[in-house]
Structures are given as structure tokens and as C-alpha cells.
Image: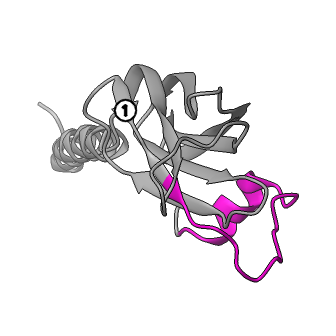
């Protein structure tokens, strides 16, 4: 016959094992809270907000946030330039949020954020406003502009 202290130790180990398993399951559920969408295509048109005309050669930067596992997120940044129709298109392997920013000579920078991506194709059209102050900051890296003007981190 087993000693009472041994039986008590076995019972405590069984309870401890069950609590450990429950904690691990909870941790997995919490870390899976952010869902990545795969093969994301971000595209759109950059236009002049005054006349609706497309802006050729506008700089466009897209930051795409993804779940990097164990409650860690990170982002990938891609840059491009619009074509003669003001269009741009970039592709990302995975992500759950995108922020698109654009600027062109004689225009002010602007950005747009989309959270909780549901589709693998995202359309983000931006309207740029003429820069009346002539203090165009188009040389400033758009990635830095995005990071300093959003609460995404």
C-alpha cells in the first residue's frame, strides 16, 4: 500500500500537469490571435486631389505587417513608382495589415492604413494635395514617415 504522502504527491503532479497543459493551450490561442493573409497584392492609383488626374512617377511605399510567431509582429517594406496612369502594384507573401504612403514633387505626403486584411487583394487609392508651402519633403524616406505618423508598432 502506498504512503499517504506519495498519494498526495501523485495527486499534486496530476493537477500540475493539467494546469500546465491548460496554460499551453491558452498561450497557443493568444499567439494565434493575429491571422496572416497569404499572397497579398496591394495596388491602387495615386491622383491629384484637385483635378482627379493620375500622378505619374509618384513614390509609393507599402509596409505590410505580419505575425512572426510567439506574439511577435514584424513588417516588410516595398517601394515603387507609379506608371503613366498613376498606378502601382506590390505583392507580399503574408500579412494582416498594410500602410500605404505616397509623395510626388510639388505634393504633400499622405498615407492610408488598412487593418485586419480579409482578402488577398487590397485596393488603396490615394489623393495627393499640392504643396502650397513649397517645402516638399519628397526626399524624406516614406518608410520613416509611416513609422513616425502611425501607432503601428
Give the labeled residue for mark 1: 122
- Asked where in the image residue 132 lies, by quadrant, the reply is bottom right
Q: Is residue 124 left or right of residue 81?
A: left
Q: Which residues are magenta?
A: 127-150
Residue 101 vs residue 71, the one in the foreground = 101
Q: Residue at x 79, y 56 (%)?
A: 105
User: Main structural element of the magenta stretch: helix, strand or loop?
Assistant: loop
Q: Is residue 84 left or right of residue 141?
A: left
Residue 118 vs residue 127, the one in the foreground = 127
Q: Residue at x 35, y 24 (%)?
A: 121
Reply above or below: 91 against 43: above
Is the residue marked by circle 1 packed among few (<14), some (14-19), or many (20+) residues within 10 Å?
Answer: some
Image coordinates for residue 112, horizontal then vertical, percent: 46, 56
Q: Residue furthest right?
A: 139
Q: Residue at x 26, y 41 (%)?
A: 29
**Judging from the image, what secondary structure is the residue with disc 1 in?**
strand
Q: Residue at x 70, y 43 (%)?
A: 58
Reply above or below: 135 against 139: below
Residue 143 visible in the picture? yes
Amino acid at each position: 500500500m502506498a504512503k499517504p504522502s506519495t498519494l498526495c504527491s501523485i495527486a499534486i503532479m496530476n493537477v500540475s500537469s493539467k494546469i500546465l497543459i491548460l496554460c499551453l493551450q491558452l498561450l497557443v490561442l493568444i499567439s494565434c490571435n493575429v491571422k496572416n493573409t497569404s499572397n497579398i497584392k496591394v495596388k491602387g492609383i495615386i491622383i491629384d486631389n484637385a483635378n482627379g488626374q493620375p500622378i505619374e512617377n509618384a513614390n509609393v511605399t507599402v509596409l505590410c505587417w505580419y505575425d512572426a510567431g510567439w506574439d511577435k509582429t514584424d513588417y516588410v517594406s516595398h517601394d515603387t513608382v507609379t506608371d503613366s496612369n498613376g498606378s502601382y502594384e506590390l505583392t507580399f507573401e503574408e500579412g494582416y495589415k498594410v500602410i500605404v504612403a505616397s509623395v510626388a514633387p510639388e505634393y504633400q505626403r499622405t498615407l492610408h492604413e488598412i487593418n485586419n486584411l480579409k482578402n488577398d487583394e487590397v485596393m488603396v487609392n490615394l489623393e495627393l494635395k499640392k504643396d502650397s508651402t513649397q517645402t516638399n519633403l519628397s526626399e524624406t524616406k516614406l518608410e520613416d514617415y509611416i513609422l513616425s505618423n502611425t501607432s503601428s508598432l
